[in-house]
Amino acid sequence: MSGKDGDVAERGRGDRLIKEEIHDPYMARSKPKEPTVCPECHAVFHKGRWQWTARPAGDVHEMMCPACERIRDDMPGGILTLSGAFLGKHRDEILKLIHNKVEEEKAEHPMKRLMGVEDSPDGETVVKFTDLHLPRGTGEAIERAYDGELDIQYTKESNLVRVYWNREK
């Protein structure tokens, strides 16, 4: 045989080396048995997703949900960093907006939660979330309400999103 029907040595490798994607270690490899209840937050895995619903009667499985695992391990899915002189003057208002956005999302999606708010020595406020999408949505809400500069950086390898918001005046 010759040409494209020849052996592998003659054809070369048609399948380039493919970099394997790193998947989120906090997402289960398989779906939990139904119904499953998180012993920490009491979210229920039902109809293929985690949701806020009454604890089912009878025999239920227990398993910590991905959001509670992230909180336990202090491993955020997203980080929002707020900075600038404007933040110092309007910090309480901005934090209230963040809490409102989180509560709105969490009501429908139990895996979207706020992990914590910390102030750094250099005047920044760092907000950690259990989810990849919530920091972006929260940052965009702050930008809509207060202007400023928003920068969103996804790091696929570590399955983390970093959102930066800054406003000086």
Image (spheres, grey):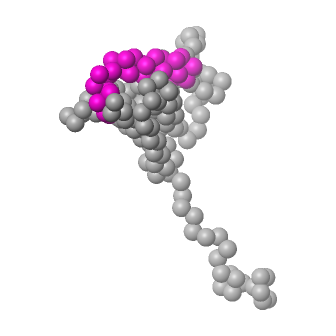
**Is residue 43 at all visible to an observer of this figure?**
no
Name the residue at 51% across, 47% down: 23
Where is 148 relative to 156, above or below? Answer: above
- The answer to whether residue 131 is magenta is no
Tell me if residue 74 comes above or below residue 91 in the rendering.
below
Q: Give the image quarter of residue 17.
A: bottom right
Q: Where is residue 21 in the image (x, y as percent from the top left)?
A: 53, 54
148 or 52: nearer the viewer: 148
| Picture coordinates of residue 75, whole percent (x, y) | 37, 37
- For this orientation, the residue located farthest to the left is 121
| Left or right: 2 in relation to 36 | right
Q: In which quarter of the image is the C terminus?
A: top left
- For the stretch drawn in magenta, the main secondary structure is helix
Identify which residue is drawn at 62% across, 22% down.
46
Question: The N terminus is located in which quarter?
Answer: bottom right
64 lies above or below 21: above
- Say if the magenta span includes residue 103: yes
Q: Give the residues drawn in magenta, as a range.
A: 83-110
